[in-house]
Amino acid sequence: MQNIYSTILLNTNGGWIGLFLRTAILLIMIFISSCGNGSVAPAEGYQVIPAESPQPAGDRMFGIGITESEEGFGSSFDVALQAGIQVIELNIPWDSIEVSEGVYQDPMGGVFEAIGFFGYYDIDVMLSLAVVNTVHSTVPDYLSGSDWDSPEMIEAFNNLVDWVLSEIPSNVTVISLSIGNETDLFLSDDAWVDYIQFVASTSDYIRSSYPDIVLGVKNTVMNGVVGYDLFHVQQVNQYTDVVMLTYYPQTSSFQVMDPEVVHSHLEQIVISFPGREIWLNEVGYQSGSEYCGSSLSEQAEFYHEFFTAWDDCRVNIKLVLIDWLHDISGEQLDEMEEYYGISDPGFLEYLATLGLRYHDGTDKYAWTQLLEETGARGW
């Protein structure tokens, strides 16, 4: 999906940032003794599918995009811990940080200060600096006339990275940085050439200055691997440390694909990037039935098939982050509709029903199935 979980949700629903800051001290003093993976109680009306030949988590990393329920961030975070999360991701547009040439701000009401919270729980942070954010470029206005591979564009982005990383709290581990978010959905064939050079130049600087940070460029599976843009995605990944992808198996009309397709898709990803480490920075499957042709049971089945397929590809696919924990609110859906400029009912149902749980904080079948899968593998 064109993931604007951080870009829109944080930007327009700044309440969770405020809640972060107000409750961090309280929450870090709480010893969470009930967040381990115990037995999974079946959801009413749903029989949990036993994990199929589960393989130990080992060196794989797992996370969830923590969208808030009506009960707020604290409760939502506690719920996410039950699944054994190790990482979260923040996707932040460039122009929300650099507000004019060389002038920077902590965006979205103080997101960099707020992520100090995660350090207290040993949860690592992935940063996506959204130079391109799905359907838009987010370069600051003063660079709007510059080519991607121009010296001024490259220098400005390197300066941005320096500033951002200087603002990260000392107790937080930033494990990765993505140079753009789902760039394949925005770039034309001609623009790809310049963008690849932009990535080559900026990655050289970042790698030499911050050698512990893993670099990537987020692209989509459905367009950039199994679709028509594989060549460009392979080319840009010559300059990355890992291949970063987002995965939402659906048609162009937002109809879900059969859950079992995940096996062939993951195999195709591995084949397309031989010998490379692969991260699935976003994985999601909606439950909406009216326009997307899914259901609560089908969404749960997808996560069973996904973890089984991940086990088979565990040598190459080392990180997965599920989007989202909760369905978003109606207000947030309206904001996304405005951002994308798309009112297609299938698209809106897709965005509205990606959560593993409902917005009111109750479980969908997918959540109980996911707990079965993560618990069986030791997360």
Image (spheres, rainbow, N blue to C red):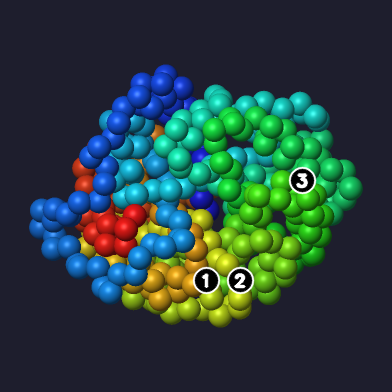
In the image, taking residue 295 as reference, residue 238 lies left or right, namely right
User: Residue placed at 54% from the left, 36% from the top?
Assistant: 172
Residue 295 seen: no
N-term-proximal mark, 1 vs 2: 2
**Numbered label attached to residue 45:** none
Q: Are marks 3 and 2 in contact (CB under 8 Å)?
A: no
Is residue 104 visible to the viewer in this orientation of the structure?
yes
Q: Which mark is residue 316?
A: 1
Q: At which x and y percent is residue 330?
A: 35, 38
Label disc, if present, on residue 276 of the rendered structure: 2
**Residue positioned most to the right:** 151
- 92 or 213: nearer the eye? 213
Q: Which residue is mark 3?
A: 209
Which amino acid lies under the numbered mark 3 shown in the image of this protein?
Ser
Seen in the image, is 258 located left or right of residue 41? right
Nearer to us of marks 3 and 2 is: 3
In the rendered image, residue 73, in percent from the top left (x then y), is placed at: 36, 32
Question: Helix or strand or loop: what does disc 3 sit on?
Answer: helix
Task: Work out how far the residue at label 1 is from the one at label 3, CA to CA, in angstroms.
Answer: 27 Å
Asked if residue 32 is positioned above or below residue 61 in the image, the reply reads above
* Amino acid marked by disc 1: Asn
Residue at left offset 43%, top offset 79%: 264
Q: Decide: few, some or many residues near mark 1? Use Cα within 10 Å; few <14, some 14-19, many ≥20.
A: some
Q: Earlier in the sequence, mark 1 or mark 3?
A: 3
